[in-house]
Amino acid sequence: MDGFKSLEELYNRVKPALKCKVKDLNRINVYYIHESDVFNYLKNTLWTKKNNLTLGEIVNDIMCTSNAELEAYVQSIISKEKRQLEKSDQPSERRA
């Protein structure tokens, strides 16, 4: 990811590819995956293992990422968030 000063700059540069991927997911009735989910999935799982990625390779990764892998990633995040909410919603035990 050389050549980009920040992750935000990279995100903005590949946003058209991210939008395209999300539209592809929408076509198969997957509406809960957002552009940021695709970007974070690749950033956390694939791009950390690679060096000197070109813009073309990054766009290719976005478009070729398995829909099933993206769904599993986002569902695991949703599940974790739900568990955290459930824990925070439980009343604390009061001592008598």
Image (cartoon, grey):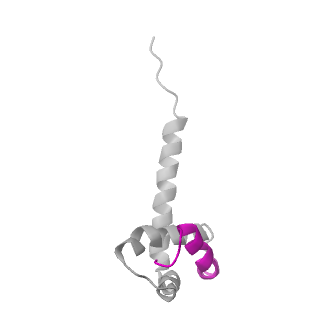
Query: Residue 33 location, x and y as percent?
Result: 58, 69
Q: Determine the residue positioned at 40% across, 70% down.
A: 45
Query: Residue 51 location, x and y as percent?
Result: 37, 79
Q: Nearer the viewer, residue 10 or 59?
A: 10
Reply yes or no: does residue 23 show up in magenta: yes
Q: Determine the residue positioned at 59% across, 80% down.
A: 21
Q: Residue furthest top?
A: 96
Reply yes or no: does residue 9 show up in magenta: yes
Q: Determine the residue positioned at 35% across, 74% down.
A: 49
Q: Which residues are magenta?
A: 1-29
Q: Nearer the viewer, residue 15 or 41?
A: 15
Q: Number of callouts in the render? A: 0
Residue 39 in view here: yes
In the drawing, does residue 18 fall left or right of residue 40? right
Up/down of 87 relative to 63, above or below = above
Q: Nearer the viewer, residue 54 or 58?
A: 54
Query: Residue 70 location, x and y as percent?
Result: 48, 72
Which image quarter is the C terminus in? top left
Q: Residue furthest left?
A: 49
Image quarter of residue 36: bottom right
Residue 33 in view here: no
Up/down of 84 relative to 63, above or below = above
Query: Residue 42 location, x and y as percent?
Result: 46, 73
Tell me the chief SS of the magenta region: helix
